[in-house]
Amino acid sequence: MIKVSIVIPAFNEEKLIERCLKSLIKQTLPRKEYEIIVVDNNSTDKTAEIAKKYADRVITEKRKGVLYARQTGTMEAKSDIILRTDADGFVPKNWVKRGLSNMENNPFYVAFSGFYIPDNNKAMLKSISKFIINFRKTLYSMGGKTEWLTGSCSAIRKSAFKKVGGYNFKGDPVIEDQQGIGHRLSKIGKIGFDEKWWAYYSPRRFNNAINTGTDIFNDYIMYQMLNNLYYMIFKKHPKKVLGKWKDIRE
């Protein structure tokens, strides 16, 4: 019996997706109780070929963008409980079971969020990641309720997702993937936050910024801070005037 569905969007992830999927097939929850869905977002490399070795289903979504990929995977899922993570990261052995337990033990919650931490031991990266997560968590928990979900580590009820109309494809994909969908879900139910539930992510965007001399402060930190603040205040998607940051999957 499928109790939970894991949806993973992927675009040209041949270098890292195998690591992700290997971590997902070696979980403490029995393999027959969860399904792994990879949504190949029109990749031009061997992403789909590699994914087929491990995933239960590999679905092609030709519309470019992480929101289209997540939406397609969610709608195709067999379970009402959807776990979200990214193809360039990986998860601990109890990740699926803990995500499922969060939702089963809190039947009136429409979603749950967790942490994401870099997949290396660089102190600066860990500090920045922790700062950004806590900033968002605090920002979107004002008023006594959480309105934020991490794209790398979160759970959503498919029934609630459908009720709010899924993702807003016209919005900023970075904001919509976390704050936008979280805000709308919070209107119909509670969103929980589990500080002991996390996934590892690849800091390749940050590393690339260092190697290419990109303005890390403006493009990596200020973009996320200002855009999150803008959305919190106006509940509208910011136009890309607050920074040059671009989702690496776009």
Image (cartoon, rainbow, N blue to C red):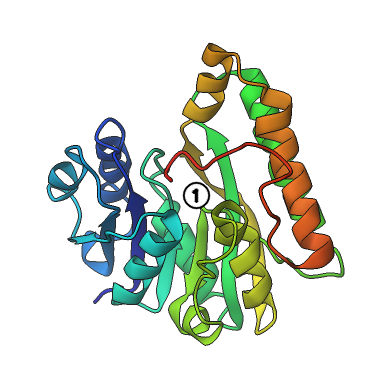
Q: Residue at x 56, y 36 (%)?
A: 117
Q: Amino acid at mark 1?
A: Ser
Task: Locate residue 36 relative to residue 239 in the image: left or right.
Answer: left
Q: Residue at x 73, y 66 (%)?
A: 236
Q: In front: 148, or 240?
A: 240
Q: Position of residue 173 (x, y in %)?
A: 54, 56
**In this figure, which residue is indicated by the disc labeled 1?**
152
Q: Position of residue 190 (x, y in %)?
A: 67, 76
Q: Quadrant of residue 50?
A: top left
Q: In front: 147, or 216?
A: 216
Q: Is residue 73 above or below residue 194?
A: below
Q: Residue at x 63, y 65 (%)?
A: 180
Q: Residues within 10 Å of mark 1 (few under 14, many from 20)?
A: many
The answer to whether any part of residue 28 appears in the image is: no
| Residue with the most extreme right position | 143
Q: Quadrant of residue 35?
A: bottom left
Task: Locate residue 248 relative to residue 75 in the image: left or right.
Answer: right
Q: Position of residue 186 (x, y in %)?
A: 68, 76
Q: Position of residue 220 (x, y in %)?
A: 65, 32
The answer to whether any part of residue 239 appears in the image is: yes
Badge 1 marks a residue whose secondary structure is: loop
Q: Quadrant of residue 181?
A: bottom right
Q: In front: 191, or 216?
A: 216
Q: Is residue 127 above or below residue 25?
A: above
Task: Locate residue 46 relative to residue 160 in the image: left or right.
Answer: left
